[in-house]
Image (spheres, grey):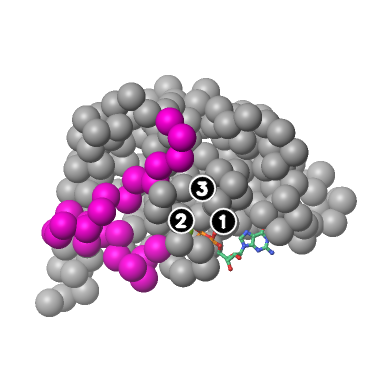
Amino acid sequence: MSRRGADSGAEARLRAIFARLRSELLAAHRAHRKVALLGQPGGGKSTLLDLVTDRGCVPRPVIGQRTDAFEWSRWEDGPQRPPVLRYRDFAFVDAPGYDTLAHPAEVFAEAFPFDVFDRILLVLGGKVRAADDRIWRALRQRSLTARTLVARGFAESLTEEERAAVSAELSGRFDGRFVLFSNRERTGLAEIGRFVGLAGDDR
Ligand SMILES: Nc1nc2c(ncn2[C@@H]2O[C@H](COP(=O)(O)OP(=O)(O)OP(=O)(O)O)[C@@H](O)[C@H]2O)c(=O)[nH]1
Ligand SMILES: [Mg+2]
């Protein structure tokens, strides 16, 4: 199969998954508070989710293993559990990082069921990329930025000056809707918890 052919196959699968995810969330999870975590690969989405839910999600998010590697995009083929994680009255979707061969940002921008979610966390692990701007544009076009928070992780690796520069950049690019956080040092997690509707204690 040509590379192009393989790519379109992966895209078609991903679109099918997003369609199935939408109907699943609207049916089985209709009464749940729905929260999506999406963003750059390795940005810390799964770790963040595990921490803000006090490691209580069922199933637990898979950390430190590219979500690509366990083939989220094959979900539509088989009897596997849908990629929805439950915690209290929440239904979390811990999406695979976008901007990869199997998970192109353009397909996310066009077909991810953003509108079904009550809250969206756009998690960045480093510099803002074109793919992040693309997703933000998609959210804007759907008037969903008010329910979105851009969460920039790995904050512990930034100096004070870098922190100020990153904050200024994120503020301008994402209409002030951002937070810096660190899974390692557990900073910014309470604010993120409050945003999604979890109690904002000293998490
Ligand atoms: N230093 C540091 N490491 C982190 C932080 N957050 C996550 N990590 C590490 O980064 C790696 C990736 O974390 P994950 O939570 O799996 O990232 P992800 O965004 O879910 O990755 P994908 O699902 O593959 O897109 C793991 O080894 C984590 O331990 C952080 O704030 N600081
Ligand atoms: Mg992950």
User: Mark 3, mark 2: which one is toward the viewer?
Assistant: 3
Q: Secondary structure at mark 3?
A: loop
**Distance from label 3 to label 1 (Cα)?**
12 Å
Q: Is residue 35 visible?
A: no
Residue placed at 42% from the left, 22% from the top? 143
Question: What residue is pinned by disc 2?
Answer: 61
Residue span colored magenta: 67-89
Q: Amino acid at mark 2?
A: Pro
Question: What residue is pinned by disc 1?
Answer: 47
Q: Any atom of ligand 2 within 8 Å of the CB at mark 2?
A: yes
* Nearest to N terminus: mark 3 or mark 2: 3
Residue visible at 36% across and 66% down in the picture: 68
Q: Is residue 31 left or right of residue 144?
A: left
Where does the image place residue 155, in percent across and percent down from the top left?
A: 73, 53
- The local secondary structure at tag 1 comes to helix
The picture places residue 16, in percent across and down from the top left corner, at: 17, 48
For ligand 1, tell me if the residue under mark 1 lies within 8 Å: yes
Question: Disc 2 vs disc 1: Cβ atoms closer than 8 Å?
Answer: yes
Of the pair 84 and 104, the residue shown nearer to us: 84
